[in-house]
Image (cartoon, rainbow, N blue to C red):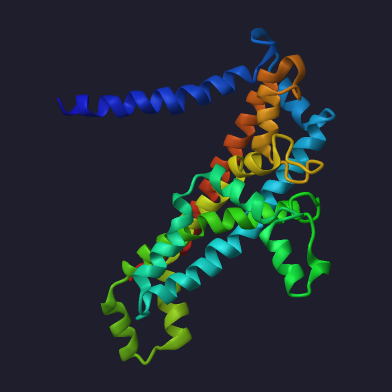
Amino acid sequence: MIHLFLLPALVFYVGFMIYPIGSALLNSFYSWKGLLRGDFIGIDNFVRLFTESPYKETFNRALWHNVLIFLVLIPVKLVVAYALALLINSKLKGKEFFKTVFFLPKLLSVIVIGYLFSLILNPTYGALNTALKAVGLSSLARPWLGDPDTALLSVILIDGWAEFGFAVLIFLVGLQSISGEIYDAAKIDRAEGLTLLFRITVPLSLPSIMIMTILTFISAFESFELIYAMQGTSGGPYYSTDVLALFFYRLMFGTAGGGDSIGLGSALAVVLLLLISGATAISMFLFRRKEVDY
């Protein structure tokens, strides 16, 4: 009887995880004419994706943007969020208030966040440019989302702001799980300050650091909603905010894939799955080798 309770979860997992992955993998090995599956062509869709123009150039540019998102978010979600978690975990007055404030953006819809920041960064009447002009920094005012040099960084920082509270919460849970007896024993050995931080706190925080690193990587390579809401399907301006998920969307539901959109889109989906799964497995292996147990 106990197995019957697992049946709904199993059906859900197979229907919404295993089947889509298997279907994408199968579709990537066939040619397509619209919605009609053609002949088996092996890895030809993958070869076209990596070697044929304009797919090759679009893939490389979008992949680089995903990597940049990860590299910028890592300091925000790891270093800054961890430092604030340490501060909140100390004897800070009103720390419950700060926990609530930091987590509030996570409760907002991505579409709402995108719309709000589109207004704030509007080049004509946006709050940011208005504030810069008011304090005599008119030279710094610019169309933040309309300038290829600043559009991607603007979107990344907005994403970091939206996810920041969640990172603080993850680190806070990890810090609060460290036994006070360990600190008491370390203080008997005259460990304090930075020694206590880097010899005790940080090593014992590795599980939460690992979780946040992996989640940040997955989030960076699944970036879609915020960019779609703020910059459209092409990742404007001039593809400066284009990412792999947007490229996939254009292949599957736009005209970028031509008549073979399902085959190319499925191939890109498989590549994304392999990238995320491979990086996650490597990260878990490396972190577990360094994990400390007291």
Please give left or right for residue 161 compared with residue 99 in the image.
Answer: right
* Residue at the spot 70% in from the left edge and 25% down from the top edge: 251
Is residue 288 visible to us here?
A: no
Residue 243 in sight from this viewpoint:
yes
Residue at 59% across / 60% down in the picture? Answer: 74
| Residue most extreme to the bottom | 190
The answer to whether 33 is drawn above or below residue 106 in the figure is: above
Relative to 80, residue 277 above or below: above
Q: Residue at x 77, y 41 (%)?
A: 60
Task: Provide residue 239's location: percent of width, then percent of height.
Answer: 78, 41
Depth check: give the residue in front, 214 or 250: 250
Q: Quadrant of the C terminus?
A: bottom left
Q: Quadrant of residue 135?
A: bottom right
Q: Quadrant of the N terminus?
A: top left
- Image side of residue 166 versus residue 226, left or right: left
Find the residue positioned furthest to the left: 1
Relative placement, left or right, of 68 versus 12 is: right
Residue toward you, 149 or 179: 149
Query: Where is residue 167 drawn, in percent x and y?
Result: 47, 59
